[in-house]
Amino acid sequence: MNNLKNRWIALYVENEVGVLAKVAGLFSAKSYNLQSLTVGTTEHEDISRMTICVTSDDITFEQIKKQLNTMVEVIKVMDLTNVPIHMKEILFAKIKRITAEEKAEAFRIVEVFAASGHIRTIDIGEDSMIIESALTERRNNELCALLRKTFKHIDIVRGGAVAMEAISTSCR
Amino acid sequence: MAMDIAGKKLFVKALQEEGVDTIFAYPGGYVTDILDELQRTEGIRIVLPRHEQALVHEAEGYARATGRPGVCLVTSGPGATNTITAITDAHYDSIPVIVFTGQVPQGLIGNDAFQEVDIVGMTRSVVKYGVTVRDRKKLGQILKMAFHIATTGKPGPVLIDLPKDIQLKTGPAEYPSEVHIRGYKPNESVHIGQLKKAYKLLRSAKRPIILAGGGVHIAGAEEELTRFAEEMHIPVVTTVMGKGSIPEDHPLYVGNSGMHGRYAANTAVNECDVLFSIGTRFNDRITGDLNEFAPNAKIIHVDVDTSSISRNVVVDVPVVSDAKLALEKLLEWASPKKTKNWREQIHLWQEEHPLQMRRDRGMTPQMIMEGINEVFPTGIVVTDVGQHQMWAAQYITLNKDRRMFTSGGLGTMGFGFPAAIGAKIGAPDQDVVCVTGDGGMQMNMQELATAIYEDVDVTVCIINNRYLGMVRQFQQVFYGKRYVDTCLCSPGGSPIDAKASEAEQPVYVPDFVKWAESYGALGIRVERGEDIIEALSRAKEHKGAAIVEFMIATEEIVLPMVKGGAPMSDMIL
């Protein structure tokens, strides 16, 4: 249908028991396609902020925003899809049972991805290493795809995107 | 600074300050302290139902009859879980009920303690707001929030879970006179620009229709709607929930639309060029196939709930507003439109396929409904769910002195009888008639004891066809009469032998007349059309609950009908 794509929402909610369950429950109850959801406290300890990524068309996305808005615990819904934002996602990748040559390849990958922002090797063993990446969600997707192709034994853990509106309007 | 008081005392104080005169309460381990406090309080009537589901339905009936929130108190665990169906019913039909559930002390939460359930978690998707009170200091504020949220904006159910330690712990005695909730701002105004656009579009129409939903009743905007239709000369179609928005004998009233709506009403929606809809969420029972709904029309949608707009049907002019506010403003602009040809066209459709059942033989549901119209010209008609509900929606005529309550959104069998009891408790000076089926009645028939002891004078009309008729109708029409799980007097719900004579059929149980009499209620069985009026008159005169059982032909069906998901133009007439 019209415009199926990833969209981002920043959601200010009451920092109370059950609010995360209520927000997450909306997506499963109404069959909305949730990609990622992160939550943490803000400068006010009684307010949490969520960064939500959904895949949806225009009409469904409008509905999602309205549904979120009707919740008593939701203080504010911000659509980040088309505004300049800073967005990062934390990712750890543990590469295991690798040869010295493979290790060198891993370092090369880290080096090239470093052109996109923060990524480095944070731990290393005889035949293994851990990469820490804080790139955009999309760049992390590309990193994952490459790591999976290149190495056989990997563990990946991702934190979901966190976003904040930009000060300078050119950022993204 | 006032002295600190126990949570239970603050609870009762809150009820008093909110003007609560009735509480529907079922006891249990974790609400006994509150009940003890209530027992010492003057001015709050305690109603003891026989089941917690019925309890909340009673509160729904009370809320709709009075316009005030229905207040419920149940215990933890099974007491709480029993309320879920009725809470969901209130959620779907936007009825303000406040359900207080007892809970195990906080120290036991999470232990799978005796009668501990996560009722807030279980009801999260069907309440307007739900929370466990975890801090005695916040109790007053949360109680105030409960009343505020349940009754403002689009009304709905609120659930407040009260752990036992919160009930006993002392804390601030203050009950706030208002609350500020930063995430909750019900719409209290109307965007004039949008409304102007809506009005201009309506003015430009050649074949305009007003579609009025339950929101018109909730806003108390029946008079405004009627005047607006009159001043603009626009015909009115209603949903089942919106029925009665305009008096039914009004020349501009076309009828109910939707799955079992009138031919003229559905055809008018199909053929109109501007559809002015107000207070309806375009439920699938109204629209049928969404792609074929009002195919020639530009659609205006007035609703208090932003999220109801452009959700099911994409609308051309959305107006977020309370129905009454919007109509009051529209009335300032309204002036007559030339719609004579269009109204005549609709009139022709009405004559082409009027709503009526055969009169040649036997007692039809239409005759029963007409009897109710005659004997109970004013008051409240409460229905259950099923065929009888649709017959009531078709043949019960409403006006400003006669209202109908029904379970529209969730379609909850078992709603009717308890909701009628609640309505009568809320409106003791009005006649209350419950129209129910033999299936739905058996879902909450234990409430007859409540009616007896609470001295509730209701007339219950059981339309008995020995079947779960609405589903049987589906089996009859769409499944080659293969009746299964629907016959109420046979094993597995399949009739023993469809060809057997009536005498060979198993005896129907219960015998509703003897059952009524065993409770000390009046029981009457009616088998012939000519006895309808006398039976209803006797029931009306009787002080106290009266059960009138009408034996109708088994294979009576509701017509017209549209198959689920089919376009509304595909009516089986």
Image: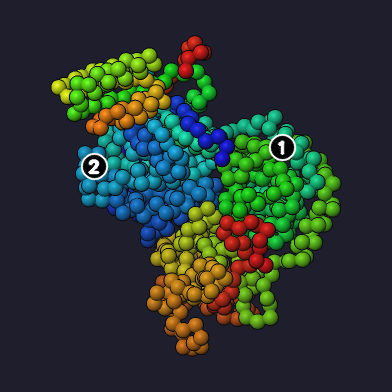
Write the residue at 85% across / 46% down.
B338
The secondary structure type at the circle numbered 1 is helix
Against A123, residue B418 (above or below) is below
Write the residue at 64% across / 73% down.
B367
Identify the mark nearer the N-term, 1 or 2. Answer: 2
Closer to the camera in the image, B357 or B472: B472
Q: CA distance from mark 1 to mark 2?
A: 53 Å
Query: Where residue B546 appears, x then y in whole percent?
Result: 51, 70
What residue did someone put label 2 on? B110
Which callout, 1 or 2, points to the residue nearer the camera?
Answer: 1
Query: Where residue B204 appears, x then y in whole percent?
Result: 80, 40
What residue did someone put label 1 on? B198
Write the residue at 70% across / 61% down.
B263
Q: Amino acid at mark 1?
A: Ala
For mark 2, does the 10 Å Cα neighbourhood hold few (<14), some (14 to 19), or many (20 or more) residues?
few
Closer to the camera in the image, B220 or A65: A65
The secondary structure type at the circle numbered 2 is loop
